[in-house]
Image (spheres, rainbow, N blue to C red):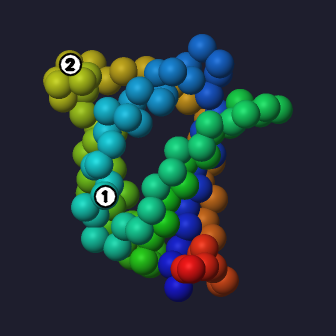
Amino acid sequence: MSIVKINVLTVPAEQREVLEQRFAARAGTVDSSDGFEWFELLRPVEGTDQYLVYTRWRDEESFQAWMEGPMKAAHQQGGPAGGGERPKPAASGSTLWSFEVVQQTGPKQG
Protein backbone atom coordinates (compact mmCIF):
# COMPACT_ATOMS: atom_id res chain seq x y z
CA MET A 1 0.00 0.00 0.00
CA SER A 2 0.91 3.65 -0.38
CA ILE A 3 2.56 6.01 2.09
CA VAL A 4 1.38 9.48 3.10
CA LYS A 5 3.59 12.40 4.06
CA ILE A 6 1.99 15.40 5.76
CA ASN A 7 4.13 18.48 6.16
CA VAL A 8 2.67 20.61 8.98
CA LEU A 9 3.55 24.26 8.30
CA THR A 10 3.04 26.94 10.93
CA VAL A 11 2.08 30.04 8.93
CA PRO A 12 1.46 33.46 10.48
CA ALA A 13 -1.75 35.11 9.23
CA GLU A 14 0.17 37.76 7.27
CA GLN A 15 2.06 35.04 5.34
CA ARG A 16 -0.91 32.87 4.29
CA GLU A 17 -1.36 34.50 0.89
CA VAL A 18 2.39 34.30 0.22
CA LEU A 19 2.44 30.58 1.04
CA GLU A 20 -0.56 29.83 -1.17
CA GLN A 21 0.88 31.85 -4.07
CA ARG A 22 4.18 30.00 -3.83
CA PHE A 23 2.44 26.62 -3.96
CA ALA A 24 0.30 27.80 -6.90
CA ALA A 25 3.43 28.95 -8.75
CA ARG A 26 4.92 25.47 -8.34
CA ALA A 27 1.74 23.64 -9.35
CA GLY A 28 2.61 20.60 -11.42
CA THR A 29 6.23 20.24 -10.31
CA VAL A 30 5.59 17.11 -8.24
CA ASP A 31 2.99 15.57 -10.58
CA SER A 32 5.46 13.87 -12.90
CA SER A 33 7.65 12.40 -10.15
CA ASP A 34 7.92 8.63 -10.24
CA GLY A 35 5.71 7.11 -7.54
CA PHE A 36 3.73 10.31 -6.87
CA GLU A 37 0.00 9.67 -6.31
CA TRP A 38 -1.67 12.74 -4.76
CA PHE A 39 -1.17 16.29 -3.44
CA GLU A 40 -3.37 18.65 -1.41
CA LEU A 41 -2.63 21.95 0.32
CA LEU A 42 -5.04 22.25 3.25
CA ARG A 43 -5.77 25.75 4.62
CA PRO A 44 -6.80 25.96 8.30
CA VAL A 45 -10.36 27.14 8.86
CA GLU A 46 -10.32 27.90 12.57
CA GLY A 47 -8.37 27.32 15.75
CA THR A 48 -4.89 26.88 14.25
CA ASP A 49 -2.27 28.60 12.11
CA GLN A 50 -1.05 25.31 10.65
CA TYR A 51 -1.40 24.39 6.99
CA LEU A 52 -1.16 20.72 6.01
CA VAL A 53 0.68 19.72 2.84
CA TYR A 54 -0.61 16.23 2.04
CA THR A 55 1.26 14.04 -0.43
CA ARG A 56 0.73 10.38 -1.19
CA TRP A 57 3.42 8.13 -2.69
CA ARG A 58 3.72 4.59 -4.00
CA ASP A 59 6.52 3.90 -1.49
CA GLU A 60 9.15 5.51 0.74
CA GLU A 61 11.81 5.21 -1.97
CA SER A 62 9.73 7.32 -4.38
CA PHE A 63 9.26 10.03 -1.75
CA GLN A 64 12.97 10.06 -0.86
CA ALA A 65 13.95 10.29 -4.55
CA TRP A 66 11.68 13.32 -4.94
CA MET A 67 13.06 14.90 -1.74
CA GLU A 68 16.67 14.50 -2.88
CA GLY A 69 16.00 15.56 -6.48
CA PRO A 70 13.20 17.89 -7.63
CA MET A 71 12.14 19.15 -4.18
CA LYS A 72 15.68 19.96 -3.08
CA ALA A 73 16.41 21.74 -6.36
CA ALA A 74 13.20 23.80 -6.14
CA HIS A 75 13.98 24.96 -2.60
CA GLN A 76 17.59 25.89 -3.44
CA GLN A 77 16.65 28.19 -6.33
CA GLY A 78 16.68 31.91 -5.83
CA GLY A 79 13.83 34.28 -6.63
CA PRO A 80 10.99 33.68 -9.09
CA ALA A 81 13.30 33.41 -12.11
CA GLY A 82 15.68 31.08 -10.29
CA GLY A 83 18.29 33.79 -9.76
CA GLY A 84 19.02 36.18 -6.99
CA GLU A 85 18.35 35.89 -3.32
CA ARG A 86 16.11 33.16 -1.87
CA PRO A 87 12.82 34.58 -0.60
CA LYS A 88 12.10 34.49 3.12
CA PRO A 89 10.12 31.36 4.10
CA ALA A 90 6.39 31.95 4.55
CA ALA A 91 6.20 29.32 7.30
CA SER A 92 7.74 29.88 10.71
CA GLY A 93 7.94 26.15 11.48
CA SER A 94 7.62 22.75 9.81
CA THR A 95 7.07 19.17 10.99
CA LEU A 96 6.87 16.10 8.75
CA TRP A 97 4.43 13.34 9.65
CA SER A 98 4.69 9.91 7.95
CA PHE A 99 1.97 7.29 7.61
CA GLU A 100 1.36 3.97 5.87
CA VAL A 101 -2.03 3.50 4.23
CA VAL A 102 -3.54 0.39 5.82
CA GLN A 103 -7.14 0.84 4.64
CA GLN A 104 -8.72 2.94 1.93
CA THR A 105 -12.02 3.40 0.16
CA GLY A 106 -13.51 5.71 -2.41
CA PRO A 107 -16.95 6.70 -3.63
CA LYS A 108 -19.14 3.88 -4.89
CA GLN A 109 -19.53 3.82 -8.65
CA GLY A 110 -23.22 3.87 -9.42
Q: Quadrant of residue 35?
A: bottom left
Q: Position of residue 9 (x, y in %)?
A: 60, 39
Q: Which mark is residue 84?
A: 2
Q: Is residue 100 left or right of residue 47?
A: left
Name the residue: 32% across, 24% down. 86
Name the residue: 37% across, 34% down. 24
Dot 1 alpha-carbon crowd within 10 angstroms: few under 14, some 14 to 19, many 20 or more: few
Q: Quadrant of residue 88?
A: top left
Q: Is residue 26 left or right of residue 8?
A: left
Q: Nearer the viewer, mark 2 or mark 1?
A: 1
Residue type for callout 2 = Gly
SS at mark 2? loop
Is 27 above or below relative to 105?
Answer: above
| Between 2 and 91, the one nearer to me in the picture | 2
Q: Is residue 41 left or right of residue 105?
A: left
Residue 26 seen in the figure: yes
Name the residue: 39% across, 30% down. 22
The residue furthest right is 47
Q: Which residue is mark 1?
A: 31
Q: Quadrant of residue 33?
A: bottom left
Residue 68 seen in the figure: no
| Between 77 and 29, the one nearer to me in the picture | 29
The residue furthest front is 110
Distance between mark 2 and mark 1 Cα atoms: 26 Å
Q: Which mark is residue 76?
A: none
Is 62 above or below relative to 87?
Answer: below
Which corner quadrant holds the C terminus?
A: bottom right
SS at mark 1? loop
Residue type for callout 1 = Asp
Name the residue: 69% across, 36% down. 44
